[in-house]
Image (cartoon, rainbow, N blue to C red):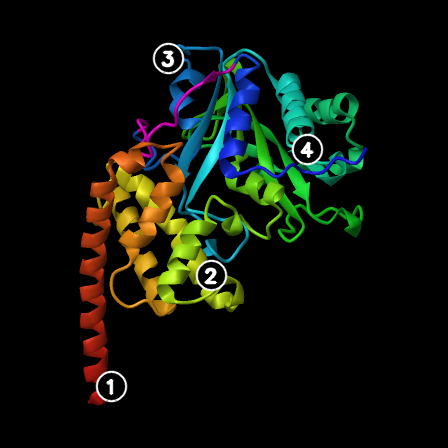
Amino acid sequence: MTISPKFLSGSQIRQTFLDFYAQRGHKILPSASLVPEDPTVLLTIAGMLQFKPIFLGQRAAESPRATTSQKCIRTNDIENVGRTARHHTFFEMLGNFSFGDYFKKQAIAWAWELSTEVFGLPASNLVVSVFREDDEAFAIWRDEIGIPGDRIQRMGEDDNFWQSGPTGPCGPCSEIYYDFHPERGDNIDLEDDSRFIEFYNLVFMQYNKDAEGNLTPLQNQNIDTGMGLERMAQILQKVPNNYETDLIFPIVQSAAEIAGIDYHNSDEKVKVSLKVIGDHIRAVVHMIADEIRASNVGRGYILRRLIRRVVRHGRLIGIQGEFTVRVAESAIALSEAAYPNVRSREAQIKAELAREEAQFLKTLERGEKLLEEIVDR
């Protein structure tokens, strides 16, 4: 029997993941705010962040196992947003966590079961990576899961040793990649974005890293995983990039309609601008819903920068005047079932967007007038 990926909506993928782990003794916990309790981090960048005190032994866990869908913001790859199939500033990370309960063997077995039996991904389309020194993980994948050794890649620290920041809990990891083109043969290069996408990362959280880079074993061996919701949606919905999934594309379409253009018939430059708008509007809607306000410092500066990038890309595709509030309505509608605070704080979201957009448009107009005067002279 040939197995093929099941078509699921983004909402169905999220719920399927949470239900799978709930049935295996994990407590479903809500997403933490994008404003982290951890003062060393500006924004919530990973699902494990709310559990950092548990990993460090500073707080007892409510349950030995947990599962979440965590909203995250990362801007370190902001210039790649819209240009690649998978980079975002805002994304959702589906995670399962063990606090000193199960470890590598169980985490790997469940990740494989979920990927192949529940989501229906063919084993022939999957490749895994492990940390170069992690013989135990390699052996589990090869001997217990049955993956051929040539489809298990050993990789270095940059790829397969995970940490949330320069200090704190960390450990070796193992990643599962989807191969869009297995017909290209066994010459596996996981850096090839046109062929492979990493969608599930299993972190074996077992060390604490200090400011000098020293690793100290944690009190417990823990599991911290992350499955990218947008990436799994791309795979299961069989679209060429994350932006054309049902999680983002309605936002892209709303911007295209305001601009009076058709996304699918647009050139690549216009598509990039539409994707940037779709990504950034999601980010700012959730940031404002979590009570972040635009400013010139810290996370407020990140919010202001994202809003201004939206406005600038709107101008690049021919949108004149204010438009961000209308596009934000699409993002709110898409997210409110999973994150009700985007609807309950709708007035604040729209007011902040309108104020920032109007202010930036005035700045742009002043700059354009100055440029015209210089050109005229």
Q: Which residue is mark 2?
A: 272
Instruction: Name the N-terminal-most of marks 3 and 2.
Output: 3
Of pointers 1 and 4, the one earlier in the residue sequence? 4
Name the image quarter holding residue 108: top right
Q: Residues within 10 Å of mark 3 (few under 14, many from 20)?
A: few
- Asked whether the viewer can see residue 257, the reply is yes
Q: Nearer the viewer, mark 2 or mark 4?
A: 4
Q: Quadrant of the N terminus?
A: top right
Q: In the displayed structure, does residue 71 sit left or right of residue 111?
A: left
Q: Which residue is mark 4?
A: 120
Measure the alpha-carbon separation of dots 1 and 2: 30 Å
Under circle 1, the secondary element is helix
Q: Is residue 285 above or below residue 203?
A: below
Measured as percent of width and height from the top left, residue 57 is found at 41, 13
**Residue 37 within the magenta-colored segment of the rendering:** yes
Q: Which mark, by number, is residue 59?
A: 3
Q: Residue at x 80, y 48 (%)?
A: 185
Residue under label 1: 375
Q: Which residues are magenta?
A: 26-38
Mark 3 vs mark 2, foreground winner is 2
* Sequence-earlier tag: 2 or 4: 4
Q: Find the distance from the CA under tag 3 to the CA under tag 2.
A: 44 Å
Identify which residue is drawn at 53% across, 63% down.
Answer: 264
Instruction: Give the number of the mark in front: 3 or 4.
Output: 4
Q: Main secondary structure of the magenta part?
A: loop
